[in-house]
Amino acid sequence: MRNARRGVCFPIMSRIHYARQKHLLRLLKAHPKIELQLVAGGSMLLERYAEKFLPAIKKDGFQIAEALFNVIEGGHHVAMARTAGLAALEFSNVLYRLNPDIVLIRGDRFEQLALAMVASYLNKTIAHIEGGDLTGTIDESVRHAITKLSHIHFVTNEPARRRLVQMGENPKRVFNVGSPDTEFASLVKKKFYPATINDSGVGHTVDFKKPFVIVIYHPVTTELNNRESAEKLLKAVGDLNTQAVWFWPNNDAGTAEIAKAIRIYREKGFLRNDKIRFVTDILPEDFIALLKKSSVFVGNSSAGIKECSYLGVPAVNIGTRQQGRLRGPNVLDVRNDSKAIKAAIEKQLRRGPYKPSLIYYRPGTSKKIADILSKTDLYVQKKFYDHQS
């Protein structure tokens, strides 16, 4: 018996998603009408991340109800597809055991589509965070597919809300609550400690009293030149007379190519005067504290679009991965070309901080999500909403 509380199953399939949903998780856990069922899977459970993140989750006061060991490594498209398939198999049993009222899915990861499919066939109400955005790669198709399987929608901006209605979703079920990502960034007050970076990873010891850039570059799954693109970026950053903190890519297809480019660059020392420190990952609050101190954010992560917009951090967005996503004036888009990337970074370094943008920020985002989940009508059978009829 749940004492009339609604069971909300929240699968977290990557450490980045955990980082961005921490405040929402706290409110779901504390809500008197909700029983949070936290499921950890995907790259969260890989050894290189689990040793840091699993103790942190426990320290944050969360209990993992179930674990999904579903990752097939290799950085290949076949590995990615098989990982999604394994996620579906594992989640079928987990969802049957937990028997929640709602499955809450965030974003556009390929595993999340598998989870949404399973929840649909088990007649669960699905709530989706961040539908309706436009981006490059397969992520956009995955995001829209999850939308069509979902019953409750929490979008982060007004254009996204309109797109979901255009896709046949009932406007009464689409809530523009803002981005939990930017809300979390707004709440972090933690002081940054240099040892967070300099005591982990390898490479240059960063002097945080001087300018530095952050680099996060993920594979683009629909392109075949991820290693070449990473090499161009490495050259551009290496040619800068500026320090850099470079984070490891995610686990999508193509990550092995980027990892190989980084290892060759790092181990063979193509540039003897490098000022780059390569880091696997850091905890959520530490990342936001680092982001606040950075001079420029470089790469193709949505952090440059969302968190940096709110914090006013200049961003250089590379290539097609975030193509079409709503962006603020802090973002400078550039093609995959070493000279163009270097010039864009230098331009942003000269420009300095931007005025914070509120395109993704709404006060009380997570509270709105928790309150809606606690009281909205639940249903299973969807119908196409024809707004012209």
Image (cartoon, rainbow, N blue to C red):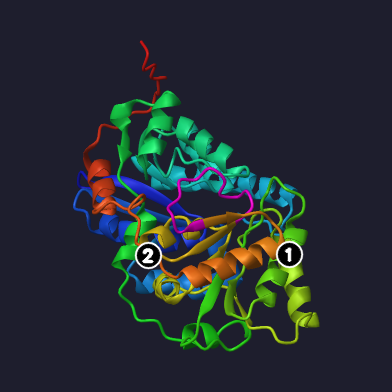
Over which residues does the magenta segment extend?
A: 318-331
Amino acid type at image mark 2:
Leu
Distance between the Cα atoms at labels 1 and 2?
28 Å
Question: Which secondary structure is most common in the magenta stretch?
Answer: loop
Q: Which mark is residue 320?
A: none
Q: Position of residue 190 (x, y in %)?
A: 33, 77
Residue closer to the observer: 112 or 282: 282
Q: Quadrant of residue 164?
A: top left
Label 1: element kind: helix
- Residue visible at 28% across and 47% down? 369
Question: Can see residue 69?
Answer: no
Where does residue 325 sit, x and y in percent of width and height? Answer: 50, 45
Between residue 377 and residue 175, name the one nearer to us. 175
329 or 373, which is in the foreground? 329
Q: Is residue 136 above or below residue 168?
A: below
Could you tell me if the residues under marks 1 and 2 are in contact, i.e. CB atoms within 8 Å? no
Position of residue 179 measured from the top left corner of the image (x, y, whole percent) = 36, 51
Residue at position x 55%, y 44% in the image: 135
Q: Given the image, on which type of amino acid does mark 1 rest? A: Lys
In the picture of the structure, the residue carrying the numbered disc 1 is: 232
In the rendered image, the vertical position of residue 253 relative to residue 61, given as above or below? above
Give the residue pinned by disc 2.
311
Q: Is residue 26 left or right of residue 297?
A: left
